[in-house]
Image: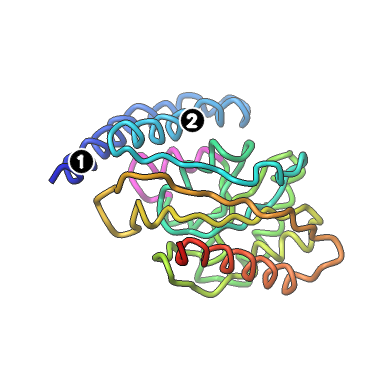
Amino acid sequence: MILFLRSLLFYVGVILAILVFAPLSLMILPLPYPQRYRVMTKWGLFVIWWLRKTCNLNYQVYGLENLPTTAAIVLSKHQSAWETIAFQQIFPTQVWLLKRELFWIPLFGWALATLNPIAINRRRIHQSMQYIIEQGKQRLAQGLWIIIFPEGTRVAPGQQQRYGIGGALLAAQSGYPVVLVAHNSGQFWPSRGFIKRPGTIQVIIGPRLESTGKSAKEINLLAENWIEETMQRFVDN
Protein backbone atom coordinates (compact mmCIF):
# COMPACT_ATOMS: atom_id res chain seq x y z
CA MET A 1 0.00 0.00 0.00
CA ILE A 2 2.83 2.40 0.85
CA LEU A 3 4.43 1.83 -2.57
CA PHE A 4 1.14 2.64 -4.26
CA LEU A 5 0.72 5.88 -2.30
CA ARG A 6 4.31 6.92 -3.00
CA SER A 7 3.87 6.20 -6.71
CA LEU A 8 0.59 8.12 -6.75
CA LEU A 9 2.25 11.12 -5.14
CA PHE A 10 5.02 10.91 -7.71
CA TYR A 11 2.59 11.03 -10.63
CA VAL A 12 0.66 13.92 -9.12
CA GLY A 13 3.89 15.94 -9.04
CA VAL A 14 4.76 14.95 -12.60
CA ILE A 15 1.36 16.03 -13.92
CA LEU A 16 1.50 19.35 -12.10
CA ALA A 17 4.97 19.96 -13.54
CA ILE A 18 3.70 19.23 -17.07
CA LEU A 19 0.94 21.80 -16.56
CA VAL A 20 3.66 24.36 -15.89
CA PHE A 21 6.23 23.40 -18.51
CA ALA A 22 3.92 22.67 -21.48
CA PRO A 23 2.66 26.28 -21.80
CA LEU A 24 6.18 27.51 -21.04
CA SER A 25 7.54 25.53 -24.00
CA LEU A 26 5.35 27.55 -26.36
CA MET A 27 6.23 30.85 -24.72
CA ILE A 28 9.98 30.33 -25.18
CA LEU A 29 9.74 28.90 -28.71
CA PRO A 30 11.37 32.00 -30.28
CA LEU A 31 14.56 31.37 -28.27
CA PRO A 32 17.52 29.48 -29.81
CA TYR A 33 17.41 25.73 -29.25
CA PRO A 34 20.21 25.54 -26.61
CA GLN A 35 18.37 28.07 -24.44
CA ARG A 36 15.02 26.30 -24.86
CA TYR A 37 16.71 23.01 -24.04
CA ARG A 38 18.20 24.33 -20.81
CA VAL A 39 14.81 25.60 -19.69
CA MET A 40 12.71 22.60 -20.72
CA THR A 41 15.04 19.96 -19.31
CA LYS A 42 14.44 21.44 -15.89
CA TRP A 43 11.23 19.40 -16.04
CA GLY A 44 13.28 16.21 -16.29
CA LEU A 45 15.55 17.40 -13.50
CA PHE A 46 12.49 17.90 -11.30
CA VAL A 47 11.05 14.49 -12.19
CA ILE A 48 14.26 12.66 -11.25
CA TRP A 49 14.52 14.62 -8.01
CA TRP A 50 10.84 14.03 -7.20
CA LEU A 51 11.24 10.31 -7.98
CA ARG A 52 14.02 10.11 -5.42
CA LYS A 53 12.01 12.00 -2.80
CA THR A 54 8.70 10.17 -3.24
CA CYS A 55 9.73 6.67 -4.29
CA ASN A 56 13.31 6.49 -2.98
CA LEU A 57 14.50 5.56 -6.46
CA ASN A 58 17.94 6.83 -7.43
CA TYR A 59 20.49 5.98 -10.11
CA GLN A 60 24.21 5.49 -10.55
CA VAL A 61 26.24 5.78 -13.74
CA TYR A 62 29.34 3.79 -14.62
CA GLY A 63 31.64 4.56 -17.56
CA LEU A 64 31.28 8.34 -17.87
CA GLU A 65 34.95 8.40 -18.81
CA ASN A 66 33.96 6.70 -22.08
CA LEU A 67 31.99 9.69 -23.34
CA PRO A 68 33.57 11.40 -26.37
CA THR A 69 34.16 15.13 -26.44
CA THR A 70 32.32 15.47 -29.76
CA ALA A 71 28.67 14.89 -30.54
CA ALA A 72 27.73 11.21 -30.62
CA ILE A 73 24.94 8.73 -31.28
CA VAL A 74 23.66 6.92 -28.20
CA LEU A 75 22.29 3.41 -28.76
CA SER A 76 20.60 2.25 -25.58
CA LYS A 77 18.43 -0.44 -24.11
CA HIS A 78 14.86 0.76 -23.55
CA GLN A 79 12.91 -0.64 -20.58
CA SER A 80 10.83 2.24 -19.23
CA ALA A 81 10.11 5.96 -19.45
CA TRP A 82 12.85 6.56 -16.88
CA GLU A 83 15.77 6.64 -19.31
CA THR A 84 14.03 9.11 -21.62
CA ILE A 85 14.06 11.52 -18.67
CA ALA A 86 17.30 10.65 -16.90
CA PHE A 87 19.45 10.70 -20.06
CA GLN A 88 18.88 14.46 -20.14
CA GLN A 89 21.06 14.67 -17.02
CA ILE A 90 23.58 12.02 -18.05
CA PHE A 91 24.44 13.09 -21.62
CA PRO A 92 25.15 16.50 -23.19
CA THR A 93 22.55 18.56 -25.08
CA GLN A 94 20.56 16.09 -27.13
CA VAL A 95 17.63 15.26 -29.35
CA TRP A 96 15.73 11.99 -29.56
CA LEU A 97 14.63 9.65 -32.30
CA LEU A 98 10.98 8.87 -31.62
CA LYS A 99 7.68 7.93 -33.21
CA ARG A 100 5.68 10.94 -34.30
CA GLU A 101 2.54 9.65 -32.53
CA LEU A 102 4.01 10.97 -29.29
CA PHE A 103 3.24 14.49 -30.50
CA TRP A 104 -0.47 13.70 -30.20
CA ILE A 105 -0.31 13.42 -26.41
CA PRO A 106 -1.97 16.59 -25.03
CA LEU A 107 0.44 19.05 -23.40
CA PHE A 108 3.34 16.61 -23.09
CA GLY A 109 3.51 15.92 -26.81
CA TRP A 110 3.25 19.60 -27.66
CA ALA A 111 6.17 20.41 -25.38
CA LEU A 112 8.15 17.49 -26.78
CA ALA A 113 7.69 18.79 -30.33
CA THR A 114 9.45 22.05 -29.43
CA LEU A 115 12.68 20.18 -28.61
CA ASN A 116 13.54 19.30 -32.23
CA PRO A 117 13.27 15.49 -32.03
CA ILE A 118 13.68 13.32 -35.10
CA ALA A 119 10.11 12.09 -35.42
CA ILE A 120 9.46 9.22 -37.83
CA ASN A 121 6.51 7.36 -39.27
CA ARG A 122 7.31 3.73 -38.47
CA ARG A 123 4.90 2.54 -41.17
CA ARG A 124 7.10 4.04 -43.88
CA ILE A 125 10.41 2.31 -43.26
CA HIS A 126 12.35 3.47 -46.34
CA GLN A 127 11.33 7.11 -45.97
CA SER A 128 12.08 6.96 -42.24
CA MET A 129 15.62 5.69 -42.85
CA GLN A 130 16.33 8.55 -45.24
CA TYR A 131 14.84 11.03 -42.79
CA ILE A 132 16.94 9.69 -39.90
CA ILE A 133 20.13 10.09 -41.94
CA GLU A 134 19.27 13.55 -43.25
CA GLN A 135 18.01 15.00 -39.98
CA GLY A 136 20.55 13.12 -37.88
CA LYS A 137 23.49 14.55 -39.80
CA GLN A 138 22.11 18.05 -39.34
CA ARG A 139 21.69 17.61 -35.58
CA LEU A 140 25.16 16.10 -35.17
CA ALA A 141 26.73 18.92 -37.17
CA GLN A 142 25.08 21.34 -34.72
CA GLY A 143 26.88 19.56 -31.87
CA LEU A 144 23.77 17.78 -30.59
CA TRP A 145 23.81 14.22 -29.32
CA ILE A 146 21.18 11.84 -30.66
CA ILE A 147 19.45 9.33 -28.37
CA ILE A 148 18.20 6.20 -30.12
CA PHE A 149 16.57 3.06 -28.73
CA PRO A 150 17.31 0.55 -31.52
CA GLU A 151 14.67 -1.94 -30.34
CA GLY A 152 12.09 0.75 -31.03
CA THR A 153 9.94 0.02 -27.99
CA ARG A 154 10.16 -0.64 -24.28
CA VAL A 155 11.27 -4.18 -23.50
CA ALA A 156 10.68 -6.00 -20.20
CA PRO A 157 13.75 -7.14 -18.21
CA GLY A 158 15.18 -10.36 -19.60
CA GLN A 159 13.60 -9.86 -23.02
CA GLN A 160 14.90 -8.61 -26.35
CA GLN A 161 13.44 -7.21 -29.56
CA ARG A 162 15.00 -6.99 -32.99
CA TYR A 163 17.55 -4.16 -33.24
CA GLY A 164 16.57 -1.67 -35.93
CA ILE A 165 19.28 -0.51 -38.31
CA GLY A 166 18.46 3.24 -38.30
CA GLY A 167 20.94 4.35 -35.64
CA ALA A 168 23.75 2.22 -37.04
CA LEU A 169 23.02 3.50 -40.54
CA LEU A 170 23.29 7.09 -39.33
CA ALA A 171 26.58 6.29 -37.60
CA ALA A 172 28.04 4.58 -40.67
CA GLN A 173 27.12 7.45 -42.99
CA SER A 174 27.99 10.30 -40.64
CA GLY A 175 31.21 8.96 -39.13
CA TYR A 176 30.25 10.10 -35.63
CA PRO A 177 31.08 7.80 -32.68
CA VAL A 178 28.52 5.54 -31.03
CA VAL A 179 27.94 5.36 -27.28
CA LEU A 180 26.42 2.10 -26.04
CA VAL A 181 24.28 2.01 -22.91
CA ALA A 182 22.81 -0.77 -20.79
CA HIS A 183 20.70 -0.27 -17.66
CA ASN A 184 18.15 -2.00 -15.45
CA SER A 185 15.45 0.66 -15.12
CA GLY A 186 12.72 -1.87 -15.86
CA GLN A 187 13.37 -3.65 -12.58
CA PHE A 188 12.25 -0.54 -10.69
CA TRP A 189 10.01 1.30 -13.17
CA PRO A 190 8.13 -1.37 -15.17
CA SER A 191 7.00 -0.27 -18.62
CA ARG A 192 3.41 -1.27 -17.92
CA GLY A 193 3.34 -0.90 -14.16
CA PHE A 194 2.14 1.90 -11.91
CA ILE A 195 4.31 1.07 -8.90
CA LYS A 196 7.81 2.52 -8.70
CA ARG A 197 10.07 0.34 -6.56
CA PRO A 198 12.80 1.83 -4.34
CA GLY A 199 16.43 1.18 -5.12
CA THR A 200 19.24 2.31 -7.40
CA ILE A 201 19.05 2.02 -11.17
CA GLN A 202 22.44 1.17 -12.64
CA VAL A 203 23.49 2.68 -15.96
CA ILE A 204 26.55 1.27 -17.72
CA ILE A 205 28.18 3.23 -20.55
CA GLY A 206 30.35 1.06 -22.77
CA PRO A 207 33.62 1.82 -24.54
CA ARG A 208 33.25 4.24 -27.42
CA LEU A 209 32.44 2.53 -30.70
CA GLU A 210 34.08 4.24 -33.66
CA SER A 211 31.92 4.11 -36.77
CA THR A 212 34.52 5.09 -39.36
CA GLY A 213 35.29 2.18 -41.68
CA LYS A 214 32.41 0.05 -40.40
CA SER A 215 29.21 -0.88 -42.17
CA ALA A 216 25.81 -0.25 -40.62
CA LYS A 217 25.30 -3.98 -40.23
CA GLU A 218 28.61 -4.35 -38.39
CA ILE A 219 27.87 -1.42 -36.08
CA ASN A 220 24.40 -2.76 -35.31
CA LEU A 221 25.74 -6.22 -34.51
CA LEU A 222 28.50 -4.85 -32.26
CA ALA A 223 25.96 -2.67 -30.46
CA GLU A 224 23.49 -5.51 -29.97
CA ASN A 225 26.14 -7.93 -28.72
CA TRP A 226 27.60 -5.49 -26.19
CA ILE A 227 24.25 -4.26 -24.88
CA GLU A 228 22.70 -7.72 -24.51
CA GLU A 229 25.83 -9.24 -22.96
CA THR A 230 25.98 -6.35 -20.48
CA MET A 231 22.26 -6.69 -19.71
CA GLN A 232 22.95 -10.28 -18.70
CA ARG A 233 24.95 -8.97 -15.71
CA PHE A 234 21.73 -7.60 -14.22
CA VAL A 235 20.01 -10.96 -14.68
CA ASP A 236 22.92 -12.88 -13.14
CA ASN A 237 23.00 -10.54 -10.15
Say left or right for 170 vs 162.
right
Q: Quadrant of residue 88?
A: top right
Q: Which residue is mark 2?
A: 40
Q: Amino acid at mark 1?
A: Leu
Q: Amino acid at mark 2?
A: Met
Q: Is residue 172 magenta?
A: no
Say left or right for 145 vs 25.
right
Residue at x 52% of width, y 67% of height: 232
Q: Nearer the viewer, residue 71 or 36?
A: 71
- Residues drawn in magenta: 103-115
> Main SS of the magenta segment?
helix
Rendering coords of residue 110 (x, y %): 42, 41
Q: Is residue 108 magenta?
A: yes
Comparing labels 1 and 2, the label whose residue is closer to the camera: 1
- Separation of residues labelled 1 and 2 (CA atoms): 23 Å
Please tell me how crowded label 2 is: few (under 14), some (14-19), or many (20+) other residues with Cα within 10 Å. Answer: many
Q: Which residue is mark 1?
A: 8
Say left or right for 51 vs 77.
left
